[in-house]
Amino acid sequence: MFHRTETRPVKVGNIQIGGNDQVVIQSMTTTKTHDVKATVEEINRLAEAGCQIVRIAVPDMRAAEAIPLIKKEVNVPLVADIHFDYKLALKAIEGGIDKIRINPGNIGRREKVEAVVKAAKERGIPIRIGVNAGSLEKRILEKYGYPTAEGMVESALYHIGILEELDFHDIVVSLKASDVRLAIEAYKKAAETFRYPLHLGITESGTLFSGTVKSAAGLGALLAMGIGSTIRISLSADPVEEVKVARELLKAFGLAANAATLISCPTCGRIEIDLISIANEIEEYISKIQAPIKVSVLGCAVNGPGEAKEADIGIAGARGEGLLFRHGKIIRKIPEEKMVEELKKEIDKLAEEYRKQ
Ligand code: SF4
């Protein structure tokens, strides 16, 4: 078992990555960064969904110049995603970015690398090294023949070495691959090799459905080993979905602070209510509740309350009505048409009680 607490803490704005047991949720905007209005809107939507750090693409000077304008409108820390161009990195740092994602080995001449590292150091900004199985250095690929976990860690160590030589240590590392087993192996090897916090991700994982399954499989295995201080779920979907999946995944490992959880039955021939739509509505409702409460929605009362004893609040369907229960005990009956409304009220009450504690 690895321990996230043993990684070096790195600050990104007011958020800490590593050095504790938290796992920070990240996502990335899909807008053109120079379109300030659209980018701000998307960042705020992501933050509202629970995203703690947002990455924006900085492919050109127009995007880099938009950073101060975007920063003024948002509260969540921002990461600039930059490939190769040190001038963009300097502009992003000057514009108040909270972290940059750039591989120092790809910047070019030493003076350019030194300029970026110096600027990042002066502003206290960390650098994420992003190793990707699909774009390993030629010499590493030649050495191993194809992308391997050893090769990926070797690539990470190469970029880390450049930063360490310049006495820069506020480093976060990702080792992404679209192959789940390769990603798991690479992250495991990295956790054994160095103490910089790891940013987990399965890259190009697919659509909302397949990408969720692949990410949960890969990142779930790593989280269960105690690896990973920040995660990004990559989906070909609205990035808000990435945040929802990340939150759900962290909840499964007890790593999401103040998040409400839904327990719902798989339904069977005993079902007495339209459980699927109720469960979906309640899931959406509790996604914004900031309290560690468990809500249960069950199709019938046969096994219902007993099946969800650990729930703080829940309903079980009965003919034409719902049974509201707390910790497995029925507290009252509610007519079917008022079931969802009443359950929401009870959830709010519980969340309020939690806030006052
Ligand atoms: Fe079937 Fe009732 Fe169990 Fe749901 S709670 S799966 S409806 S027995």
Image: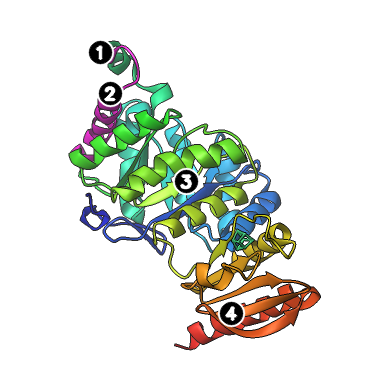
Q: Earlier in the sequence, mark 3 or mark 1?
A: 1
Residue 295 visible at all:
yes
Q: Alpha-carbon distance for marks 3 and 1?
A: 30 Å
Mark 4 or mark 3: which is in front?
4
View quadrant of ligand 1? bottom right
Mark 4 or mark 1: which is in front?
4
Circle on res. 232: 3
Q: Are marks 3 and 2 in contact (CB under 8 Å)?
A: no
Residue 191 picture quarter: top left
Which residue is identified by label 2? 151
Q: Are marks 4 and 1 in contact (CB under 8 Å)?
A: no
Q: How many marks?
A: 4
Q: Alpha-carbon distance for marks 4 and 1?
A: 62 Å
Q: Earlier in the sequence, mark 4 or mark 1?
A: 1
Which residue is identified by label 1? 143
Secondary structure beneath disc 1?
helix
Q: Are marks 4 and 2 in contact (CB under 8 Å)?
A: no
Callout 3 amino acid: Arg
Crowding at dot 3, Cα within 10 Å, few <14 / some 14-19 / many 20+, comes out as: many
Q: Earlier in the sequence, mark 4 or mark 2?
A: 2
Q: Alpha-carbon distance for marks 4 and 3?
A: 36 Å
Crowding at dot 4, Cα within 10 Å, few <14 / some 14-19 / many 20+, comes out as: many
Residue 57 visible at all:
no
13 shown above or below 301? above
Which residue is identified by label 4? 325
- Asked whether 321 or 226 is in front, the reply is 321
Q: Are marks 1 and 2 in contact (CB under 8 Å)?
A: yes
Residue at position x 34%, y 35% in the image: 184
Q: Earlier in the sequence, mark 3 or mark 2?
A: 2
Residue at position x 23%, y 32% in the image: 157
Residue 355 position, x and y percent, is 50, 83
